[in-house]
Image: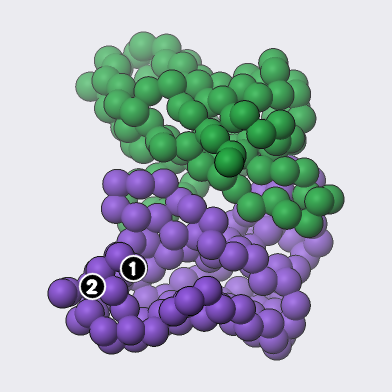
Amino acid sequence: DVKVTQSSRYLVKRTGEKVFLECVQDMDHENMFWYRQDPGLGLRLIYFSYDVKMKEKGDIPEGYSVSREKKERFSLILESASTNQTSMYLCASSLVVGTGRYEQYFGPGTRLTVT
Amino acid sequence: GQQVMQIPQYQHVQEGEDFTTYCNSSTTLSNIQWYKQRPGGHPVFLIQLVKSGEVKKQKRLTFQFGEAKKNSSLHITATQTTDVGTYFCAPPEGLFYNQGGKLIFGQGTELSVKP
């Protein structure tokens, strides 16, 4: 069974703080993703990575950066948290596309509140 | 950029009634995935459709992929309270498999079921 874990379920940070959200998957998946989910806006892709040290911008990368030093771990960094980054953050992973089976497996999410 | 339109945004049904959500794209899709997110939960993969005109069933859920591969639908027969949640369609970006397996998530259809 694929397991994707996220470091925190709930997080409260102050404006201007540097925030790290960690995601770990245990199924040797090549692809990893960070989304944010807001009411009425669905899932929006922030960044994704298809290999170690590789990263690609998603649809809303502004204000975020990522790090993938190991295959199983994908970190999302908010360099200077702002109140408009209050959201639910979801991490996901999937197999490489060439396998034909690249459905995404999601972690439980981190609800971040920036005050 | 590439987008998918999912309708309706909300659907309230009486338990036992049927439910259908539609996913439409202006471009031809290589395949499409469907996910379900329970309230307070994370998206969970349901199925992937690949072939033109494909129909797949999972118990009371019927998934269809249009002949032109530009639309898809999910139909639930005789809804139950366990069907409550948001259903997302998610085709891959681009016509062909893309590196990284990036998906384009629809806005989702939120289903509520009154007992």
Q: Residues within 10 Å of mark 2 (few under 14, many from 20)?
A: some
Question: From this viewpoint, is residue A64 visible?
Answer: no
Residue B68: in sight, yes or no? yes
Residue B19 in the image: x percent, y percent?
36, 82
Q: The disc numbered 1 marks a residue on which chain? A: B
Give the left or right position of residue A54, taking residue B112 as reference. right
User: Exactly how many numbered labels are in the figure?
Assistant: 2
Q: In which quarter of the image is residue A17?
A: top left
Is B66 above or below relative to B88?
Answer: below
Q: Helix, strand, or loop for circle 1?
A: helix
Residue at 63 percent across and 83 percent down: it is: B55
Residue B61, numbered circle = none
Q: Which color is chain B depicted in?
A: purple
Above or below residue B84? Residue A59 is: above
Q: Residue at x 49, y 47 (%)?
A: A44
Q: x and y percent of residue B102 in the render?
A: 67, 49
Residue B113 shows which numbered tag?
2
* B112 sits left or right of B62 in the view: left
Q: Residue at image x 36%, y 37%?
A: A88
- Identity of the amino acid at label 1? Asp
Q: Of all residues shown, which one is farthest toward the right? A: A98
Residue B91 on image: x %, y %: 63, 63
Q: What numbered label is drawn on residue B83?
A: 1
Counting residues from the N terminus, which is met first, the one under dot 1 or under dot 2? 1
- Asked whether the beta carbons under mark 1 and mark 2 sit within 8 Å of each other, the answer is yes
Q: Closest to the observer: A86 or A10?
A: A10
For the C terminus of chain B, give its image quadrant.
Answer: bottom left
Mark 1 nearby-residue class (10 Å; few <14, some 14–19, many ≥20): many
Residue type, numbered disc 2: Val
Label 2 marks a residue whose chain is B
Chain colored green: A
Viewer-proximal residue, B5 or B53? Answer: B53
